[in-house]
Amino acid sequence: MTGAPFPQRPRLRLAASSPRPRRLEVRINATEARYPYGLSRAFHLTYVELDELIDAAIRLEARL
């Protein structure tokens, strides 16, 4: 046997996984006086998405 018993192959390396963004459970509820309306089911948002939602709500309220 003149060759190496195990041929050299490129080694596979595992890349460090990026952490998944943490998601928050969010429910939207709007009320007028004592009567609730606009109840929503829970949906999941990241912190960035929640900030965007709050900014949009502030802009909508500024129009009123």
Image (cartoon, helix red, strand yellow):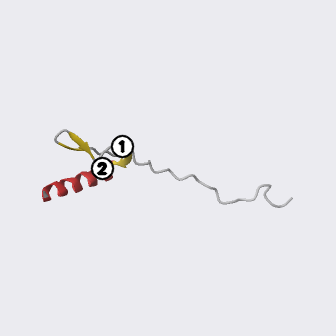
In the displayed structure image, the side of residue 36 where residue 6 appears, left or right: right
- Image point (36%, 43%), residue name: 24
Q: Nearer the viewer, residue 2 or 53?
A: 53
- Image point (32%, 53%), residue name: 49
User: Within 10 angstroms of label 1, few (less than 14), some, or many (20 or more) residues?
Assistant: some
User: Within 10 angstroms of label 2, few (less than 14), some, or many (20 or more) residues?
Assistant: some
Q: Residue furthest front?
A: 35
Residue 12, quarter of picture: bottom right
Residue type, label 2: Leu
Residue type, label 1: Leu
Q: Which residue is mark 2?
A: 50
Q: Total marks drawn? A: 2
In the displayed structure image, the side of residue 40 where residue 30 appears, left or right: left
Residue 32, quarter of picture: top left
**Circles 1 and 2 in contact, beta carbons < 8 Å:** yes
Q: CA–CA distance between discs 1 and 2?
A: 8 Å
Up/down of 33 relative to 49, above or below:
above
Label 2 residue SS? helix
In the displayed structure image, the side of residue 24 where residue 31 appears, left or right: left
Q: Which part of the image, by quadrant, shows the N terminus?
A: bottom right
In x, y percent, where is residue 61? 16, 54
In x, y percent, where is residue 20? 44, 48
Label 1 residue SS? strand
Q: Which part of the image, by quadrant, shows the C terminus?
A: bottom left
Q: Nearer the viewer, residue 46 or 54?
A: 54
Earlier along the polypeptide chain: callout 1 or callout 2?
1
Task: Give the number of the disc on residue 24.
Answer: 1
In x, y percent, where is residue 38? 28, 48
